Image: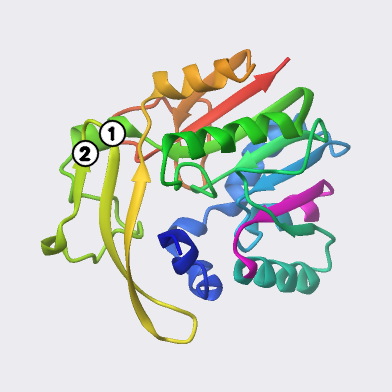
Amino acid sequence: MQWYEKLFENYAEQYDKEPFTQGTIGECDFIEKELNYDRSLIIIDIGCGTGRHAIELAKRGYSVTGIDLSEAQLRRARQKAKRENVTVEFLRCDARNLPFENQFDAAIMLCEGAFPLMETDEMNYEILKNSGKALKTPGKFIFTTLNGLYRLFHSSHQSPEGRPQDGADNSQGEYFDFMTMRSRDVLTFSDDDGNQHQVVVSERYYIPSEITWLLKSLGFQKIDIFGAKLGAFSRENRLTTEDFEMLVIAEKQ
């Protein structure tokens, strides 16, 4: 079992309490603006987790399909959608092998929903490839990913307040590999039943030119990259070395 499968096996309620999941309203405001408030558009939320973006967009009138690898996360997403009295199709799918082709007007993949958590660059590439394949032409892809510029300019043990790496015991071998742009961080967490676990988190950080090249190789013509501010996505946020995440907006035209 990979670390992300272990983490999200029984972590749905705790996940919704995390500081970095509290910006949903502002993030959906940005998505709506990017989609020109066209509620006829059909959206796929890749790595939807507990459905926070999918449900909020459905409340605003969009047709949304949410996919995730974790059945526990999806179960909570379905419960929340039912409580909010909105219809969202939540499906258990692996983002590396999506069963969709030319079906959606827009794809979102936020808060490291799938990419860049995978074990290899090839797996991460498959996620981008499948996301593009699921889109119609024209189509828009909005996602966030870890900013390699941040990790290059900061100590490998530093992390913004509220991120999952906080509280990890730095004596246990965390490091950042400059050759592969991969981090290794020990994360101790309590699951929804109060049981404590420890996983070794391995994530891939990307620099903007890599993301641009990967997306161009997949047929995206227009690619814009900004700093991702929690709950306040904006095209005005120029990416800097202080941004932990990048906000990427790519278009198939």
Residue at the spot of label 2:
177
> Of residues 181 and 231, which is closer to you in this image?
181
Residue 171 percent coordinates (x, y): 11, 63
| Magenta residues (range) | 57-71
Number of on-image labels: 2
How far, Cα to Cα, is label 1 from label 2? 6 Å
Mark 1 and 2 residues: CB-CB less than 8 Å, in contact?
yes
- Please give the name of the residue rendered at 45% of the width and 38% of the height, measured from the top-left corner: 145
Image quarter in which the C terminus is found: top right
Instruction: Categorize mark 2 by other alpha carbons within 10 Å: few (<14), some (14-19), many (20+).
Output: some
- Colour convention of the picture: rainbow
User: Label 1 crowding class (10 Å Cα cut-off): few <14, some 14-19, many 20+?
Assistant: few
Q: Which residue is mark 1?
A: 180
Q: Amino acid at mark 2?
A: Asp
Is 231 positioned to the left or the right of 180 in the image? right
Q: Quadrant of residue 84?
A: bottom right
Residue 17 screen position, x and y as percent? 49, 70
Instruction: Classify mark 1: helix, strand or loop.
Output: loop
Q: Amino acid at mark 1?
A: Thr
